[in-house]
Image (cartoon, helix red, strand yellow):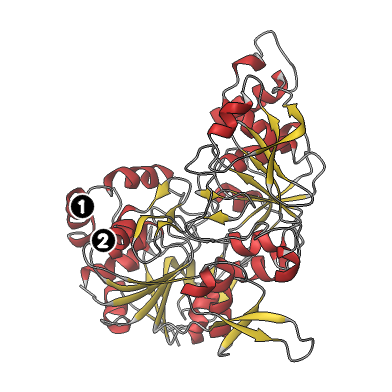
């Protein structure tokens, strides 16, 4: 796995989705525990265990703590998660003993809509009583976002997702600004990054509004702003993401092919 | 004391039109066979309670058995939407349903309060969200510290139905793997039914197992394969392909209805392909 062979993939071939996953995995280099849902965050967390942080403890909402899946699971409750976990707990225990007291360092969350304060909607598009699109609902997100050490949002970058105004606030990120989390008595630091398929947005330390801090190679800032539903600010020291290394890309492709 | 009875008799005895019914199982051990038996017996006007409606409640809702849904996450895990759930809410098909939604933490605490026979549970949650305005929660102040907290009302279903790996002949139940909220649901409910993969002479201790004594259960019924396309760890595997198949099939009302007629209503066992 760690050998970069002659057949190793060229980083320039990486798709934007692969870059997004690699960037998310890098965020877990120095983390002890991560809470993950299905899809890209799960892939990123397993990739992080493979290439950056073999001791990373994966915690899934289903109650599996310390799961070591070989495959990317389809659901958060696949059998492989239970079979490889250090311990399996009930749902009340998961929320009351593990998430609530802030024992998890980082949580990955997705959402259908994200606003400039990284508040999240996963409930409805349109009016609650007469929705245009009924989404799955809150799941564990509100309490996860309130209590985990920090939250990393993983979402596609488009005007449909990054919106001026949420149709429904399912999960509070930074609320209406810098004092919101303190007023609400939340334990964790809240969202520290929104990782999209174009770049990374991070909250301004003073205003807590999301600012573009990083773009992927070959992505124009104008295109990122065009795909954002509010006038997106750009950091003075905008970085370009270091592209996936051949080791990262080979590991990711091997993982998803399992 | 649990009576070990055929599934058909257990459902006929315990589940009535208009009941609030919790069929639990968090991704794992979802009681599909029992839910299908509820459909075959034509139960109507049910208040369906479940943290994660999953395919089973998509089927019950799509067949018109639900009056109300109490839940916290209505998706097809890892795949996408539950199309019958969405169609009922977005278009009122086959008829409109009432919704009461919570967060997972809220639902889990509601079951725990029900199991403890307390009127409500206390938690930190819902604050700052739009959920608080559309569901049953209330602010409460800690009498000791003054901290502002949230109260969620206890869940006391008329009936809880869960699936487990095994039971002995006295109706003592053992399940292992992901335990979800099954124990809480059984203890919170007025009546309970546990379906099992197998009936054994003696329960063999397992790591991470949950044992529910037969004397808090009303009925135990054998239903081998009864959690498919969910799974019973160590006995059956989760049928991930079925979850993907369901995404395609359930988009269309007629295809859904025809499939349910053929595989569930006309069948004797759990409806899987």
Determine the residue positioned at 19% across, 62% down: B265
Q: Which numbered disc, 2 or 1, marks the residue that appears first in the sequence? A: 2
A71 sits to left or right of B192: right
Q: Quadrant of residue A245?
A: top right
For the question of whether residue A132 can be seen, the reply is yes
Let me know if marks 2 and 1 both belong to one chain.
Answer: yes
Q: Nearer the viewer, residue A153 or A48?
A: A153
Chain where mark 1 sits: B
Badge number at residue A169: none
Q: Residues within 10 Å of mark 1 (few under 14, many from 20)?
A: some
Residue B252 rendering spot, x and y as whole percentages: 23, 48
Circle 1 SS class: helix
Q: Residues within 10 Å of mark 2 (few under 14, many from 20)?
A: many
Q: Nearer the viewer, residue B9 or B44?
A: B44
Determine the residue positioned at 58% across, 47% down: A80
Residue B189 rendering spot, x and y as whole percentages: 46, 83
Residue lying at the far front of the rendered structure: A231
Q: CA distance from mark 2 to mark 1?
A: 8 Å
Rendered view: B132 above or below B3: above
Rendered view: A194 above or below B128: above
Label 1, on which residue?
A: B253
Circle 2 SS class: helix
Mark 2 and mark 1 residues within 8 Å of each other at the beta carbon: yes
Determine the residue positioned at 31% across, 74% down: B6
Label 2, on which residue?
A: B62
B60 sits to left or right of A74: left
For the question of whether residue A258 can be seen, the reply is no
Chain where mark 2 sits: B
Residue B13 rendering spot, x and y as whole percentages: 29, 84
């Amino acid at each position: 796995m760690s050998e970069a062979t002659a057949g190793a993939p060229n980083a320039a071939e990486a798709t934007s989705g692969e870059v997004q996953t690699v960037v998310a995995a890098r965020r877990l280099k120095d983390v002890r525990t991560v809470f993950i849902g299905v899809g890209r965050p799960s892939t990123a967390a397993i990739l992080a265990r493979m290439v950056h942080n073999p001791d990373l403890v994966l915690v899934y909402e289903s109650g599996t703590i310390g799961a070591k899946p070989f495959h990317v699971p389809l659901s958060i409750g696949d059998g492989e998660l239970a079979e490889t976990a250090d311990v399996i707990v009930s749902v009340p225990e998961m929320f009351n003993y593990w998430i609530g007291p802030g024992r998890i360092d980082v949580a990955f969350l997705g959402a259908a809509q994200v606003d400039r304060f990284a508040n999240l909607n996963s409930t409805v598009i349109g009016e609650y009583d007469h929705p245009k699109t009924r989404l799955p609902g809150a799941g564990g997100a509100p309490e996860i976002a309130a209590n985990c050490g920090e939250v990393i949002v993983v979402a596609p970058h488009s005007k449909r997702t990054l919106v001026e105004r949420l149709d429904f606030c399912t999960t509070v990120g930074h609320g209406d600004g810098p004092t919101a989390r303190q007023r609400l008595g939340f334990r964790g630091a809240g969202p520290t990054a929104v990782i999209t398929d174009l770049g990374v947005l991070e909250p301004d330390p003073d205003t807590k509004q999301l600012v573009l801090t990083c773009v992927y190679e070959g992505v124009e800032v104008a295109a990122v702003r065009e795909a954002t539903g509010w006038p997106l600010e750009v950091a003075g020291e905008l970085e370009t993401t270091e592209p996936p290394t051949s080791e990262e890309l080979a590991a990711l492709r091997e993982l998803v092919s399992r | 004391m649990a009576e070990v009875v055929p599934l058909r008799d257990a459902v006929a005895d315990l589940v009535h039109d208009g009941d609030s019914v919790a069929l639990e199982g968090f991704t794992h051990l979802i009681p599909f066979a029992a839910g299908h038996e509820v459909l075959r017996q034509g139960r109507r006007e049910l208040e369906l309670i479940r943290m994660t409606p999953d395919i089973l409640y998509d089927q019950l809702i799509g067949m018109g058995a639900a009056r109300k849904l109490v839940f916290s996450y209505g998706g097809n895990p890892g795949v996408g939407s539950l199309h019958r759930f969405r169609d009922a809410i977005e278009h009122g098909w086959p008829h409109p349903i009432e919704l009461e939604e919570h967060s997972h933490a809220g639902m889990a605490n509601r079951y725990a309060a029900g199991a403890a026979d307390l009127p409500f549970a206390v938690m930190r949650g819902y604050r700052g969200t739009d959920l608080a305005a559309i569901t049953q929660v209330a602010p409460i102040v800690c009498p000791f510290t003054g901290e502002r907290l949230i109260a969620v009302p206890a869940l006391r279903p008329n009936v809880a139905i869960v699936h487990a790996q095994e039971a002995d002949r006295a109706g003592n139940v053992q399940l292992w793997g992901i335990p979800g909220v099954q124990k809480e649901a059984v203890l919170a409910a007025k009546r309970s039914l546990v379906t099992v993969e197998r009936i054994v002479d003696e329960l063999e201790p397992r790591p991470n197992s949950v044992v529910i004594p037969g004397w808090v259960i009303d009925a135990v019924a054998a239903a081998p394969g009864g959690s498919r396309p969910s799974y019973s760890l160590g006995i059956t595997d989760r049928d991930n392909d079925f979850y993907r198949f369901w995404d395609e099939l359930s988009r269309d009302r007629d295809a859904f209805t025809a499939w349910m007629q053929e595989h569930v209503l006309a069948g004797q066992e759990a409806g899987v392909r």
